Image (tube, rainbow, N blue to C red):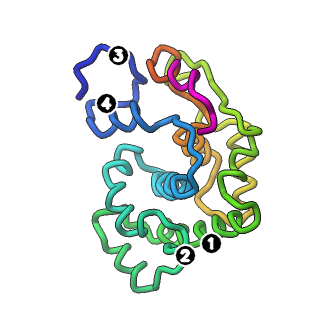
Amino acid sequence: MSHDTKTRCAWLAEDALMLRYHDEEWGVPVHDDRKWFEYILLDAFQAGLSWKTVLHKREGFREVFHGFDPDKVVRMSANELERARQNPAIIRNRLKIQATIKNARAFLAIQERLGSFDNYIWSFTDGKVIHNRFKTLAEMPATTPLSDTVSKALKKEGFTFVGSTICYAFLQAAGVVNDHVVTCFRHKELQAAPATP
């Protein structure tokens, strides 16, 4: 773990990988479609589990799902999917594995229609980051009207495992929402950073 004196969000526990993810990745605005697909895939697998569990298997997911490339994921064979279901490097849930293929198909359809998934997802906030000002983890909601709207829209597009809680998790991760608590050093840093690259 870090030995610095920076104040951070309270959800890290004693885990070096979680610390690095918090400090360098969580809440940073994403504008890369491959990264968007990664977050959607990983958060779908998180349903009912902890983010720590998923994060520690991320490299396994990266290998099994072709570097989170939706073009390759959508073409995975039945044999590949069965091997994935037997692979201890990932979360071996048949429904979530099947959902990944369905979600890749829906993701590619949005890309084809709008040029990028990034254009689509940021349209829900007019390209702006929502900077919340929560003081404690307890104040943070599991869902919001925004995540409800995104969830309904994604389901209409053909996605599965995109309930409002899952949607809020990937909106937080990908920086559409800045939910670092106000005392965390990253809250101020991200507030000062531009929403677009």
Tell me where residue 102 appears, x and y as whole percent: 60, 71
Q: Tell me which amino acid carries mark 4.
A: Ala
Q: Amino acid at mark 2?
A: Val
Q: Find residue 105 and name its label.
A: 1
Tags 2 and 1 touching, CB below 8 Å:
yes
Q: Residues within 10 Å of mark 2 (few under 14, many from 20)?
A: some
Of the image marks 3 and 2, the number of the one nearer the N terminus: 3
Q: Residue at x 28, y 66 (%)?
A: 88
Residue 102, relative to residue 89: is it above or below? below
Question: Which residue corresponds to the image point at 73% horizontal and 63% vertical from the top-left?
Answer: 157
Say what amino acid the circle numbered 3 marks.
Answer: Lys
Residue in the image at 38% along x and 62% along y = 61
Magenta part of the chain: 188-197
In-front residue for pair 55/185: 185
From the viewer's perspective, is the residue at label 4 or at label 3 nearer?
3
Helix, strand or loop at disc 1? helix
- Residue on which disc 3 sits: 6
The residue that disc 4 covers is 13
Q: Position of residue 143 (x, y in %)?
A: 64, 38
Q: Earlier in the sequence, mark 4 or mark 2?
A: 4
Q: Earlier in the sequence, mark 4 or mark 1?
A: 4
Residue at image location 51% in from the left, 22% down from the top: 187
Q: CA distance from mark 4 to mark 1?
A: 36 Å
> Which residue position holds label 2?
74
Between disc 4 and disc 1, the foreground one is 1
